[in-house]
Amino acid sequence: MLKNVQILGLQQKLSPQLIQSQLLLAVPTLALENEIKLQLESNPMLEEVTDSEPEEKEDEIESGTVLEDTSGEKETSEDKEESYDLDEWYDYSESDAEGYKSPENFEKENKVDSESKTDYLLNKVYKQRETPLDQLYRAGLEEKYVIVGEEIIGSLGDDGYLRDSLEDIIEDIKKQFIVDINIEDAEKVLKIIQKFDPIGIASRSLQECLSVQLEELDIDTETKELCLKMVNEYFDDLKSKHFEKLEKALKISAEKLKELFEIIQKLNPVPGNLDSIPERDYIYPDFIVTKDGNELRVELTDEYLPSIKISRRYIELLRSKKTPKQTREFLKNKYDAAKWFMNSILSRRETMMKVMSAIVDRQNEFFRSNGEHLKPIYEKDIAIDINMDISTVSRTVRNKYVQTDFGNFELKYFFSNPIQNHRGEDVSSKTVKEKLKAIIEAEDKSEPLSDDKITVLMNEAGFPLARRTVAKYREAMKIPKATLRRKIMT
C-alpha cells in the first residue's frame, strides 16, 4: 500500500559555484589557460580584454540601473513582471572591476609577446618521416607480398613489435584474398619490413630487434660479428651484465667488451616510438620564489593568462526592455555562470598564494639554504596554518611546481614523512633518499654496493634503516639492483 511519509534530515550538497572553484583549484596554470579560452568560446557574456579597447567608466556598469528605453514605448505590465534587479546579482569585485586581474598584471602581460611565452612548449624540430606503409608501397614488391606486408604492419603493437605469429597472419590473408602464400614468403616480407625506418620494426622479440639493428650498423666486420654473437648466443649474460663470462666466452679483453656494450646500449629497444618525434616534458612553474634581501618573495606565474571581463554589449542587451523574455533568461544564466567563473579564478589565486606562502614559512630554511634543510611536514599542517580543509590543500599542490634559484620543485616534494636519525631528530624521508642516492652514485661501478652494504653505510651516516626500507627507497627512485648497475671499468 502506497503512503506518503515525511522525513526530516540533513544533507550536505556542494553548490555549482563551489564545485567549479574546487575543480579550478586542482588545475595547473597551463591547463587554466585552456579552460579560460573554452569559457570565452562558450559564454557570450565573457570577453577578453584587449589593449586597444577604450576604458569603460565603472559607474556606468556598476550602477545596476536598467538603461532607458529609447523606443519611446511605455513599459507594459509584462515588462514590470519580468524586470530584474541587477543590483542583486551584478556586483563586480571592488578591486577587479574589469576582470579577475589587476591593471598592473594586465599591463605586464601586454609587454610580452604572447607567442614567445609558449614558444618553449613547441617542438621546433619537425622531421618528415615515411610510415612503414609508405615504405612498403615504395619497395616495388609483387602484389601478394604487398598484401602480406599490409597485414604484418596492421598487426604491429604500439611499441612496434609483432606479437601475432606468421601462421595466423597467413591464415587471415587466405580468408580474405585468393593468394598463394607460404611461411617462407611471409618471412621474406617480414625481413624486408624490419629494415624499414625505424630499423627493427616488426621484430618479434628484443633479441631480434637488436640483431636487426646491428646488421645495419656501419661498423667494422669483426666488431659487428662480436656484437651479433653476444646478442644471439649470450643474451642472458648480456642482460645480467655477467662481464667475466662474456669475456671468457667471446675471448676478448675488458676494453673490447666495454666497446661492444656501448654500441649495443645505443640501439633502440622500442622501434615503435620513433614513428613520431618524442615530445619533451616541459615544466611551467605555477609559482616563483625569490630572495629579496632577507625576505622570501612568492609570485604567481599567471601574468600571461587572458584577462577577461563581462561583455558590456550583452549587459546592455539584458537591460533593454526590448529584449525578449527568453533571451533575458538566457543572458541572465550566462551572466551568473560568467560571474561564478571569474570569482572561482579569484578564489583560486588567493588560495594558491595562501598555500604557497604557508609552505615557504614552514620550509624557510630549505629556501634560504638552497635546498639543504627540508623539514618533514604534512598537508594537514598547511591546512591548519591557513585555516582551510586538508582536501583544499591537496588540490592546490596537485601537479603544481615552484621555481627557485636552485631548481624547480613539485609542491608535493615539500611534504614527507619524518624519520628519526641517530640523535632522535626528525628528518624528511626525502633527505634520507638523497643520502642513499649519493652513496650509490659514489660506489665503485665495477663492484656496486648491495642493499645490505648500503644499509650499513646508511646506519653509519646516522640513518637507522632496515634493509627492506633501503630496497623500497631504491626502487622508488628507480635505481636498479647492484648486478644491473655494474659497469666495465678499464
Image (spheres, rainbow, N blue to C red):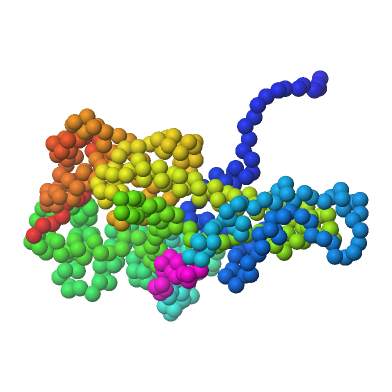
Return the x and y of residue 382 as percentages of the image width and height.
Answer: 42, 38
* 320 w.r.t. 463: above or below: below
Instruction: Name the residue rendered at 23%, 74% in the picture.
Output: 218
| Camera-nearest residue between 57 and 51 | 57
Q: Is residue 117 magenta?
A: yes
| Camera-nearest residue between 395 and 444 | 395
Return the x and y of residue 9 as percentages of the image width and height.
Answer: 67, 24
Q: Residue 85 vs residue 135: left or right?
A: right
How many marks are shown on the rendered structure?
0
Q: Is residue 482 magenta?
A: no
Return the x and y of residue 349 as percentages of the image width and height.
Answer: 50, 50
Where's the N terminus, which quadrant? top right
* 50 w.r.t. 387: above or below: below
| Camera-nearest residue between 328 and 264 | 328
Instruction: Name the residue rendered at 74%, 51% in the picture.
Output: 86
Instruction: Name the residue rendered at 50%, 62% in the picture.
Output: 104
Where's the C terminus, which quadrant? bottom left
Q: Residue 464 vs residue 165: left or right?
A: left
Q: Residue 376 vs residue 96: left or right?
A: left
- Residue 23: tell me if it is visible: no
Q: Quadrant of residue 200?
A: bottom left
Q: Quadrant of residue 317?
A: bottom right
Return the x and y of residue 62 as percentages of the image width and height.
Answer: 69, 55
- Residue 84: tell me if it is visible: yes
* 136 w.r.t. 200: above or below: below
* 468 w.r.t. 289: above or below: above
Instruction: Name the residue rendered at 38%, 52% in the picture.
Output: 297
| Camera-nearest residue between 396 and 363 | 363
The boundaries of the magenta stretch are 109-127
